[in-house]
Amino acid sequence: MGEKAALKEIKVIVFQLLDKEYAIPVSQVHSIEKIQQITRVPRVERYVKGVINLRGVVTPIIDLRSRFDLLPQEQTDNTRVIIVNIEGMEVGLVVDSANDVLDIPLEIIEPQPEVVGGIEAEYISGVAKIEKRLLILLHLDKVLISNKAG
């Protein structure tokens, strides 16, 4: 068997917010959609934009810019909703653009620095430098779960 059986890389979807690139594992991504009509929902966290009806499934939509306290931006033709699946729940993440799919060798992933562009370290699972790009790997479960304990 040897080393070939060991997982050597992780396949990720790369997306952009402002001037930074983020990555989430392809295994957690259900689909990437163009932005569509979002129905507002009362009394939810400020970063929850509302819900969409995606092929018959009511899916909550989270604005990642708002979640990370980044400046809001008008939606463009590049704006995408990445539909992710976390613990059996589908959620849409609004991003500025979804750039590509990459294989990241596990050995180049470094632990997260304390702060990356103002985003709290708890949301970040690590960073990877590929050529001249710095990819910020997100802990989706921490991004999606509110940290309002007490």
Image (cartoon, helix red, strand yellow):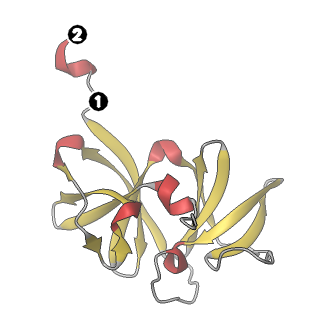
Q: How many marks?
A: 2
Disc 2 residue type (three-letter): Met
Q: Residues within 10 Å of mark 1 (few under 14, many from 20)?
A: few
Q: Residues within 10 Å of mark 2 (few under 14, many from 20)?
A: few
Q: Is residue 68 above or below residue 110?
A: below
Say which residue label 2 marks.
Answer: 1
Nearer to me, 112 or 10: 112
Looking at the image, tell me whether mark 1 or mark 2 is earlier in sequence order: 2
Which residue is depicted at the point 52% across and 88% down? 72
Query: Helix, strand or loop at disc 1?
Result: loop
Q: In the drawing, does residue 116 fall left or right of residue 70?
A: left
Query: Helix, strand or loop at disc 2?
Result: loop
Residue 113 in which image quadrant = bottom left
Which residue is depicted at the point 84% across and 53% down? 56
**Residue 119 percent location from the top left of the image:** 37, 74
Q: In the drawing, does residue 52 fall left or right of residue 131?
A: right
**Residue 132 percent location from the top left of the image:** 16, 67
Disc 1 residue type (three-letter): Leu
Which residue is depicted at the point 57% across and 68% down? 148
Q: Is residue 29 above or below residue 40?
A: above
Gap between marks 1 and 2 measured at Cα: 13 Å
The circle drawn on residue 7 is 1
Figure quadrant of the N terminus: top left
Which residue is depicted at the point 18% across and 60% down? 129
The circle drawn on residue 143 is none
**Residue 147 percent location from the top left of the image:** 53, 65
Residue most extreme to the front: 150
